[in-house]
Amino acid sequence: MQTVLIIEDEKDLAELVSFNLEKEGYRTIAAPDGISGLDEAQRQVPDLILLDLMLPGMMGTEVCKILKKSEKTAKIPVIMLTARGEEIDRVVGFEVGADDYVVKPFSTRELLLRIKAVLRRSLPDEPSGKTMRIGPIAIDPDRHTVAVAGEEIVLTTTEFKLLLNLAERLGRVQSRDLLLKNVWGYNYVGDTRTVDTHITRLRTKLGPAGDLIKTVRGFGYKMEEP
């Protein structure tokens, strides 16, 4: 049974989400603020976290930053919940490591589809038995690890999937829409900025090796040998 941690200060909403998730077979944990949410994440290590952006005491973005900096919780996928739908909020959410973003009010069906898609992305791929090497980058699909010049770097599940998708199609241009379909697992209509934001963060984490990911202006991205 997969566990979902709900960090949400609106009690009625948290209870409604919890009720619907448990109907679908998930186990749920609720936390009313960022501090208790961080404690629960460390203590129980859930399979996914639903994180409200506007929380008392500590913003959801700060909670997400802390989660992604901790080795124990860095790879837990995070879906941000917020009543604010401006593009800047989505971008900030992705920049601090969120895997997806749902704007309130949302339907239960939409939320469940997003949760299933994110959890599906976090499942390990079939063992390949080999490490992919592109220049200084070493990608181990079985262990879900990435190293640059021998030093391991921490990627979110989505960042790893994105890098692996580009690496497996080395030299081939991938449109933003195709990357959304292959990596995110559903059609994020009209929001290709999601891809751009994750590519920017991925390049930053890879350091100079991030230059191997090339932008194809007006279309998408590709990865090339050095």
Image (spheres, helix red, strand yellow):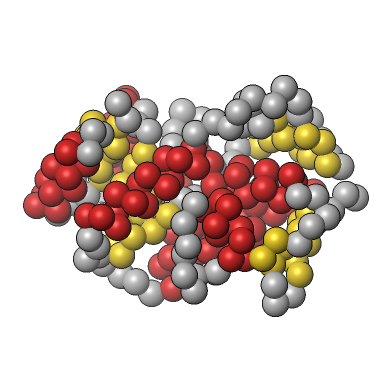
Residue at image x 86%, y 42%? 135
Is 47 or 111 nearer to us in this picture?
111
Residue situated furthest top in the rendering: 129
Is residue 120 left or right of 152 when viewed as pictured? left
Is 153 or 59 nearer to us in this picture?
153
Residue at image x 76%, y 50%? 169
Q: Is residue 153 above or below residue 213?
A: above
Residue situated furthest right in the rendering: 226
Residue at image x 44%, y 33%? 73
Residue 31 visible somewhere in the drawing: no
Residue situated furthest left in the rendering: 12
Q: Is residue 209 above or below residue 67?
A: below
Is 193 or 61 nearer to us in this picture?
193
Q: Position of residue 87 (x, y in %)?
A: 44, 73
- Quarter of the image where one finds residue 174: bottom right
- Quarter of the image where one finds residue 221: bottom right
Is 29 or 151 nearer to us in this picture?
29
Q: Position of residue 6 (x, y in %)?
A: 25, 43
- Quarter of the image where one finds residue 144: top right
Q: Total number of numbered labels?
A: 0
Residue 181 visible somewhere in the drawing: yes
Q: Which image quarter is the N terminus in? A: top left
Q: Position of residue 155 (x, y in %)?
A: 59, 41
Residue situated furthest bottom in the rendering: 218
Is residue 176 left or right of 114 when viewed as pictured? right
Residue at image x 13%, y 42%? 19
Q: Is residue 36 above or below residue 189?
A: above
Is residue 68 left or right of 147 when viewed as pictured? left
